[in-house]
Amino acid sequence: MRRIAANYIFPVNKPPLKNGIVEIDHNGAVLNLIDTKGDFTESRNLEFYNGVIVPGFVNTHCHLELSDLKGKLKQGLTHPGFIQEMVKFKKSHTIESTNKTAFLEDDLMKRNGIVAVGDIANTELTIEVKHKSNIYYYTFIEVMGLSNNSEKIIINGLDLLKKYQSNKLSSSIVPHAPFSVSPELFERIKSLAIQTNSIQSIHNQESDSENQMFGSKQGKLVDAFLTLGINLDNWKATGKNSLESVIDFLPNNNTILFVHNLYSSKNEIEKICKTFKNPFFVLCPNSNYFIESKYPDIELFMNYSDKITLGTDSLASNTSLSILDEMKTIKNINSDISFETLLSWATINGAKALKCDNKYGSIEIGKQPGINLISDFDFTKMQITDKSSIKVFA
Ligand SMILES: [Zn+2]
């Protein structure tokens, strides 16, 4: 057993404990959480650290299979330009390069204090690394297609799903984005999701040209598709924004992760909360800035703070897979936000979104949540600093 103490412990499910002690077994399971009230009379075998102790982080949006694209794409391409470049680079993927970088980044995520990941996959390339990893992965098998071959796309998706599930990896079939999935394909994904009550995820309003495409079948995204040779003859604009155009294609009772929401309005965010039983908003500020040179408007989401989770997106559009780095960015663009709020987005909310909060998300007896120390913490403001770093205990 280890007895670890720090200036504060943030269990997340209850207020922080000053000079608290957490006792864990050799597997990192929490045996006891002690409120010393600042008095360390019981200091036997105690390890004390300067900083704050928090549960392991949950990264709810990642594309591990794109790890070998780190540093390959230029910043500020805007989303349509990014998609065009991605199509080019994806062709240069090899099993060897993907595998090598995915193993490396999985290990880096662990060292960045991440214990659970919602990861998008288009291929089987990450099965091996996920199977061997200590991180809990929930894999979203992403399908897309605008032509009339939705049956074939679903069959291929189900084949891939079977491969993940036969390796005991939790996974489900999900739509890529409003603009890349035909109505027929959306219907097929929806009925599968309802049958299995699976967790769903969709990239939502990552660029303004997505709304333009649905509004008038014009704009940079349409141009990008035509340049890539994607046939849009059968695709019809709806005259509405993208979210409104596809909202009926999404299952109301499933847990759904709406990713990015960079161009979502206050009304659209409210509409999501009214329409769906268990929605979550995944914010990926560093990726958004990399691609669109814009940050999400955090204020718009604050009424739904218990629905906000954090994601890194892929290394094609980020320089690190670190939830702490996303927290630093949010703290810098929204100085009013409290550390406790930010921490709940980085831990328990993500664990609930991936339905793994029985084990992760908070430091509670019986859970095995991962134990991180954040050092270089500002105790005057009770907030992380740009210098804050992570030490992983379990
Ligand atoms: Zn993504």
Image: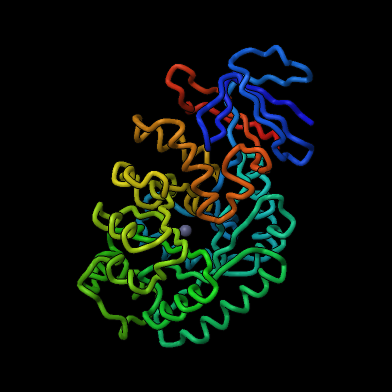
Where in the figure is residue 7, as x and y percent of width and height? 58, 19
Asked if residue 76 can be seen in this view, the reply is: yes
Left or right of 229, for residue 116:
right
Quarter holding the N terminus is: top right
Task: Decide which of 79, 74 is in the foreground and name it.
Answer: 79
Tell me the residue at 52%/23% (across/down). Answer: 377
Quarter holding the C terminus is: top right
Compared with 126, 160 (above or below) is below
Task: Decide which of 84, 355 is in the foreground and name it.
Answer: 355
Tell me the residue at 33%/73% (across/down). Answer: 248
Where in the figure is residue 207, as x and y percent of width and height? 32, 58
The answer to which image quadrant residue 182 occupies is bottom left
Tell me the residue at 67%/13% (across/down). Answer: 40
Where in the figure is residue 166, as x and y percent of width and height? 71, 71
Compared with 292, 50 (above or below) is above
Where in the figure is residue 183, as x and y percent of width and height? 36, 80
